[in-house]
Image (tube, rainbow, N blue to C red):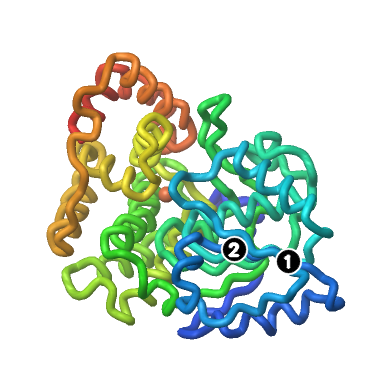
Amino acid sequence: MTKTLDTGVRNARNVDRYVFSSGAIDGLGDLLTFRRQSDQDRVIFLIDEFFQHNPTALGELPIKPTDTVRYIDTASEPTTDGIDELVQQLLIEGCRPCAVIGIGGGITLDTAKATSNLMANGGNAADYQGWDLVPGPGIYKIGIPTLSGTGAEATRTCVMTNRATGIKLGMNSDYTVFDQLILDPDLTTTVPREQYFFSGMDAWIHCIEALNGEYRNPIGDAFSWQAINLCRDVFAGGEMMSDENRASLMVASYLGGCAIATSYVGVVHPFSAGLSVVLGLHHCVANCIAMMAMASFYPQAFDDFTSFVEANQIDLPRGVCAGLADKDFEALYQATVVHEKPLTNALGENFRDILTPARVREVFESM
Ligand SMILES: [Fe+2]
C-alpha cells in the first residue's frame, strides 16, 4: 500500500490513567488499596519539602506505619549522585515497595520517577541517562503535581544533572512514565505568584519551541496548540491564579508534557540549561530569563512573552551574566551547544554555524 503520511510518531506512550478534579487527592487511599497486597506492603512517599512545614495543604495522606516518607529538598535540581544516595537509603530502610508516590513540582516528580526506575532495575542513575537505557519497568508510580508547567507529570524523562560529566539529561524511557496521575488544582493554591508564573511559562515555552521546530507531527502540534491557548487565557491579564485558571494551567502543563513527548524543544531550553548548569538557576526561572534574549529566534513568541510578563507584573531577574569571566562564557557555550537534538530541531543540523561562541556569548550577555 502506498504510504501518504509519515508522521514520525513511533508507538508513543502516555500516562496510563489520570484523575482530574478538585479534591482528587482524597482518592489516593483507594488507589493504594489496590496496590497493597498485605498490611506489610510498603509505599514510598516523596513529598516536596514545602509540605513538611504546611502539612494541612495536602489533607490527610493514607500513610501506614510500614510506609516511608521522604521530604525532597527543592533548593537545587536533582543530581545523579543525589538520586543514588536517596535510593541507597530507601533500599537499606525497608523491603521493595509496592508503589512510589511523588507529590510536588518537577523536581519531586522527577525524583519519584528516577527512584522508581532504580529501585526496580538496580544500577546507578547515570547508567540510564540517555534514550531507552532503562532495562525494565519501574515500581508502580503515582504522580501528584502541586505546581503546574514543567509537564514532568506527563513526560517519559526525569531530568538530572551529572556533576561528573556536567551533562543535564534524563532517563528518557517508556518505563519513566507515571502509571497514574492525580491532577488536583486545589494543590496549587499555595504556590507563590512568581513561581506560578515561571513554571506556567515552561509549559508555554515547550509548545512554542515545538511548533517552531523541524520535527513536528500532527499529534504533537495538537497538544501544543491547545496548551498554548490555555496558557494565553491564564496569563492574558486576568487573575492568573483564580480557581478556573489554576485548573486550566494544570491541564496546559499536562498537554505541554504530552507535546514534548512526541516532539522536541528548541533554542530556549538549551540556553536555559546553560544557566542552570553554570549559574545554578532553576529550570523555570532560567527559561524566562533566556526567553528575554529570544527576540531574534522567536520574534512573535518574544512579544507574547513580554506581554505576559507585563500583564502579570512579574519582576524578572536581569543581567544575570553581567561580569562573568571568559571561562564562564566558555562553560555557558559548552552547556548550551551540547543539546544537539533541540538545537537541530530549531536551527537545523548546522546550528553551530549560527550559534558561534561569540553569538552565544552575545545572547547570554543580553539576558
Ligand atoms: Fe521545560
Residue 117 pos. (x, y %): 71, 51
Going 52% across and 30% down the picture, which residue do you hit?
A: 167
Relative to 345, is 295 on the left or the right?
A: left
Question: Eyeballing the image, is 209 above or below 151?
Answer: above
Examine the image and state in which quarter residue 102 appears.
bottom right
Residue 115 pos. (x, y %): 68, 52
- Please tell me how crowded label 2 is: few (under 14), some (14-19), or many (20+) other residues with Cα within 10 Å: many
Residue type at mark 1 is Ala
Residue 47 pos. (x, y %): 56, 63
Going 42% across and 41% down the picture, which residue do you hit?
A: 214
Nearer to us in this view, 332 or 295: 332
Residue extending furthest top? Answer: 326
- Please tell me how crowded label 1 is: few (under 14), some (14-19), or many (20+) other residues with Cα within 10 Å: many
Residue 30 pos. (x, y %): 69, 84
Going 80% across and 58% down the picture, which residue do you hit?
A: 94
User: Is ligand 1 less than 8 Å from the beta carbon at label 2?
Assistant: no
Question: Eyeballing the image, is 366 above or below 110?
Answer: above
Rounded to the nearest angstrom, the CA distance separating label 2 from label 1 is: 10 Å
User: Label 2's element?
Assistant: strand
Nearer to us in this view, 183 or 122: 122
Relative to 169, is 118 on the left or the right?
A: right
Q: Which residue is mark 2?
A: 102
Examine the image and state in which quarter residue 238 appears.
bottom left
Q: Is residue 338 visible?
A: yes
Relative to 103, is 362 on the left or the right?
A: left
Q: Is residue 218 visible?
A: no
Residue type at mark 2 is Gly
- Count up the numbered dots: 2
Q: Which residue is mark 1?
A: 99
